[in-house]
Amino acid sequence: MTRGRRQVLRLRPGADLRRALDHFATRPGRPACVVVAGIGSLDGARLRAAGSEGDLRVPGELEIVHLGGTLSRSGIHLHLAVADPEGRTSGGHLLEGCRIRTTAEILIELLDDVRLQRRRDPETGYRELVPRALRTGNRRR
């Protein structure tokens, strides 16, 4: 069982969601993390849909209905689902360019005994997650 601690982030208007989480993940000494939940609002979103190399731009005032993924110094992998004012949803990989409209509240689990790395996988062609258990006292990522 993984031991961890929790942290709650509140991002303010104008912040870029992906950049803020990347900055959080790459602080010196930061353990591996999992984004458990995220809610809030965005002024437009930029996503990469499954199987697509381009980006999907969703304009307007949006509600974050879910945010989840992994954070590590070797890379982040986050999925975002947003809803427009009519309730239509869009989702995909979180890209830079998702600006906070009013707030974002993000629950993060900090994992003290796991190292998360990303390495290119020859089968998928993507940088995939390689989790490793850490021995007691070895808190590097």
Image (tube, rainbow, N blue to C red):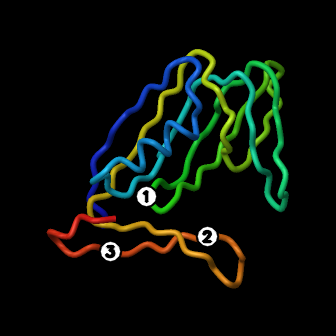
Q: Which residue is mark 3?
A: 133
Q: Is residue 26 above or below residue 112?
A: above
Q: Amino acid at mark 3?
A: Ala
Q: CA distance from mark 1 to mark 3?
A: 16 Å
Q: Position of residue 111 (x, y in %)?
A: 32, 57
The image's mark for residue 127 is 2
Tally the marks.
3
Q: Is residue 7 above or below residue 70?
A: above
Q: Which residue is mark 1?
A: 73
- Mark 2 lies on a secondary structure that is strand
Of 35 and 46, which appears nearest the observer? 46
- Mark 3 lies on a secondary structure that is strand
Mark 2: few, some, or many residues within 10 Å (few <14, many ≥20)?
Answer: some
Q: Residue at x 53, y 35 (%)?
A: 38
Instruction: Name the side, left or right, on which 114 lies relative to 60.
Output: left
Q: Position of residue 4 (x, y in %)?
A: 28, 54
* Mark earlier in primary sequence (2, 3): 2
- Mark 1 lies on a secondary structure that is loop
* Mark earlier in primary sequence (1, 3): 1
Q: Amino acid at mark 1?
A: Arg
* Mark earlier in primary sequence (2, 1): 1
Q: Quadrant of residue 72?
A: bottom left
Q: CA distance from mark 2 to mark 1?
A: 13 Å
Mark 3: few, some, or many residues within 10 Å (few <14, many ≥20)?
Answer: few
Q: Amino acid at mark 2?
A: Arg
